[in-house]
Amino acid sequence: MDHPVDTEEEANPPHKRPNIGVLGCGSGGCNMANALTTGATGLRTIALDSNAEHLKRLSTDLKILLTPQTRKEKSSDSILDHGIYAVWGSKKEVLRVLNGLDVLFLLVGLGGATGTGSSVEVARMAKKKGLPVIGLLSLPFAVESNSRTEVAQLGLKHLLEELDLAIVLPNDVLLELAPELPMAQAFSVMDELLAHPVTCFSTILIKNDIGPMLDFFSGSRLATLGLGSSIGKRKFEMATQEALHLPYLRDSPIQKGLFFAKMGPNEFIEDVEIVMDEVFKRHPEIQMLHRVIVEDTYSNRVDIILIAATNI
């Protein structure tokens, strides 16, 4: 017999609402954080950048202006020093933010010196404080300069040492998702894509601890993202197929997958099995974990958000 989806209150016992921070580093990361200032509740958004004019245009809850520091000593990865030293100049402000958090989402467009270096330093500071940290990271287009790619790859290497989970999307995905949009609008699509995991995690965290979800990705901290949305009789099947359609999910084996199913209150738990069956068809060896999010405003719509550990 079919059973309507349980609400979060019925499915899980009450639990202290965590303080969730969304911190964007550099111009790209700040834009991602800014995209979460509307439509998401219970989040504290923070922008961290060295560009004062850019910070003025943002609507985040807090803005921290980084002041570049000049130092004689150079690290072994000196191309990141600009951003790292800039955080040192604002260390008290950054620590004050971290002290009030239970979970941190760290957002950055990798490739720029300030954003990449500062994100690495913030991740180190957060790890020292024992904060769970999830990174939402974008990579440069394949046609961008070698220097940006070098900075991005080095930054990613260091971030993987500090983050509990790194969700990475290459900018090249925009060539498929938004090929005809102007650049500024296309990047807003990327901001919205990377916002989805934050809103899903934060919704679940209202009544659940993040530990089991991060433990699930233990040993495979690098992940990417798939998103599908559909309406109609076959909406669960079609949304899942769309989420799996992006090239790096089509062509690479997925080792582990956490999927969020956002659906209306009149859908059925059994429908979630359709999602799992669709994923298993394409990735029979996958280990899977799922969470259901009930959206009262959804009458005939379902969103599937897949966080997949795979090669990017």
Image (cartoon, helix red, strand yellow):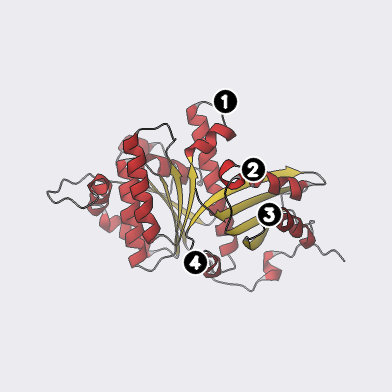
Q: Which of marks 1 and 2 is in front?
A: 2
Most distant residue in the right direction: 1
Most distant residue in the bottom direction: 13
User: Distance from label 1 to label 2 (Cα)?
Assistant: 19 Å
Residue 70 higher or lower than 213, as above or below: above
Q: Which numbered disc covers residue 312?
A: none
Instruction: Say which element carries label 1.
Output: loop
Which mark sits nearer the N-terminus, 2 or 4? 4
At a point 37% along the width and 44% down the height, the residue shown is 152
Position of 39 compared to 301: left or right? left
Which mark sits nearer the N-terminus, 1 or 4? 1
User: Distance from label 4 to label 3 (Cα)?
Assistant: 21 Å
Q: Which numbered disc covers residue 245?
A: 2
Which mark sits nearer the N-terminus, 3 or 2? 2
Which mark sits nearer the N-terminus, 4 or 3? 4
Which mark sits nearer the N-terminus, 1 or 3? 1
User: Distance from label 2 to label 4 (Cα)?
Assistant: 25 Å
Residue under numbered circle 4: 218
Position of 111 compared to 253: left or right? left
